Image: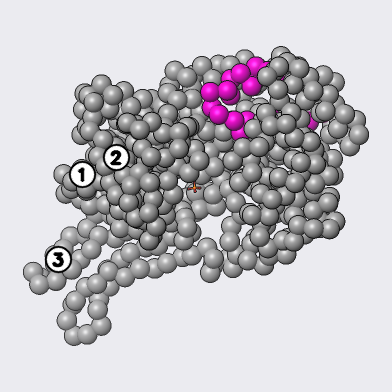
Amino acid sequence: MSIKLDTNPLRKGLQTERIVDPCVFVIFGATGDLAHRKLLPALFYLYLDGLLPRGFAIIGFASSELTDDEFRQSAKLSIAKAVTHVNLEGRLWHDFAEMLHYVHRTDDTSKSMQMLKSRIDDLDSSIGLGGNCLFYLSIPPFVFGDSAIAIRDAGLQKDEKGNGWRRIVVEKPFGSDLESARELNKILQSIFDEKQIYRIDHYLGKETVQNILVFRFVNQFVEPLLNAKFVDNIQITVAETIGVEKRGGYYDNAGALRDIVQNHMLQLLSLICMEPPRSLDPEDVRDEKIKLLRSIRPIYMARVNEVALRGQYHAGILMGERVPGYREEEHVRPDSQTETFVALKLKIDNWRWDGITAYLRTGKRLAKRGSEIAIQLKCAPRIFFGEEHRDEVEPNLIVINIQPDEGISIRFDAKVPGLSYHIQPVKMDFKYGSAFGASAPEAYERLLLDAMLGDPSLFARSDATEAAWMICDPIIQGWHALNSPLYFYAPGSWGPKEAMEFIARDGRSWRRL
Ligand code: BG6
């Protein structure tokens, strides 16, 4: 399978010199939303890119009663929705479909696991998988631990013949607080070695996020500016227009802080603020990230309202369409206090960032979809141009656009052509699409490939997940203990008006995306 099959010139497939070992990819929760929207299309793309080995199989493992053929049919429908430029007929689809298998998980866990085991053994002897097996837990978080235990009880956590590798990929959220994350780490580490455990955070698979390290540490002009002497503040935004879709049951127990801040946003903050790692070795990078997370000033529950604000969307109109309020969403409690919007002020107590605030905000049903990191520099002394032009000077801004307009833009001040010294901010833009002529591969594609290659660089380490909970736990507990207000906001807005006042108290305003 060395020939690239992809025919879309606008999409740059993944390329690597590294070769995936023959293996079986077992998807726990194979009929679920994530498996169909992300995992199966990502595996199909890897197949198109010629990156799957000759000996390769996918086993869907879930509670719906399906035959192999039915699973193949449903996978085809989902892949067709995601991979619209490829005709899923003929040999192309046929060869991929042959890799798909299904095992029905019944209420009798041990029997189902034995069926899974014998299917793995059969495939191993028929197509040669070398005893290599990756388990992907695409299931509700509260069954992560039980599933790992079931894998162990069936003797699947290691290859009986001792030749092959075993790995487990765990979806987010990793626990619901520090205690449950520690508990889950304990269970996983009692069954697998840390190097066999892959805690996924799909933000780390995004090209723009990986580029943060290059932007910071390869460009001489960037790094000298990134410290308290030159930076005024950092704003990180993850804005979504979608609501909770069909995930109300999960989301209502999670909320925006657990769903987005604890993982994606704290990862972004650590990448933009950490010290330069000794090398790009996964452990060196992870060591620096954890140091940064541990430098974030602890939040005291009693003062939570000064540094954290929560909101929830009500019903309204978004892009011309009426959308329900959060409390009207399926599987959401009608009196839910769950936040769909969060704004935070975090201080980093280290030499580099002393006194600087990082403002974080995320929300669903906001005016526009967009994730970015904006670094606002301090204003240069306004001594040159006299009273009349002083107010025209705008602080320099470096914006890393994570999505959807992937790129980096730098705002600086320029002289307006003419006789006087009028000053106006202008922008220099780098856009991935125009610079590289193709869109980047999907985050999941990269991460699934890395897990199969045994490369943990873009996965979270156990100490990082725990450190992130240490930051978030006091916020959740503080909101609860103080019965903090939940501010409502209209779909299509930028969150509750109180969020504007929240940042205005520091003499600043949120960036408009
Ligand atoms: C997931 C969250 O981790 O990230 C979702 O569970 C959210 O609620 C999604 O919609 C956002 O991902 P992206 O890649 O669209 O920014």
Residue 231 colored in magenta in the image: no
Q: Position of residue 40 (x, y in %)?
A: 68, 45
Q: How far apart are marks 3 and 2 (CA)?
A: 34 Å
- Residue 162 appears in the rendering: no
Q: Which of marks 3 and 1 is nearer the N terminus?
A: 3
Q: Where is residue 370 in the image (x, y as percent from the top left)?
A: 42, 54
The yes-or-no answer for disc 3 within 8 Å of ligand 1 is: no
Q: In this view, does 12 lie to the left or right of 278?
A: right
Specify which label sits upstream in the sequence, 1 or 2: 2
Q: Which residue lies furthest to the bottom in this view?
A: 419
- Magenta residues? 131-151
Classify 10 Å Cα crowding around label 1: few (below 14), some (14-19), many (20 and above): some
Residue at 63% from the left image edge and 66% from the top image edge: 10
Please indicate whether residue 123 sits to the left or right of residue 249 in the image. right
Upstream in sequence: badge 3 or badge 2: 2
Q: Residue 498 carries which label?
A: 1
Q: Compared to 319, does 277 lie above or below?
A: above
Give me the C-alpha separation between circle 1 and circle 2. 9 Å
Circles 1, 2 touching at the beta carbon (< 8 Å): yes
How packed mark 2 is, by other alpha carbons closer than 10 Å (few <14, some 14-19, many 20 or more), is many
| Viewer-nearest residue: 233 or 216 | 233
Position of residue 180 in the picture relative to residue 486 (left or right) = right
Q: Are marks 3 and 2 in contact (CB under 8 Å)?
A: no
Residue denoted by label 2: 311
| Vertical arrangement, residue 465 with respect to residue 374, above or below | above
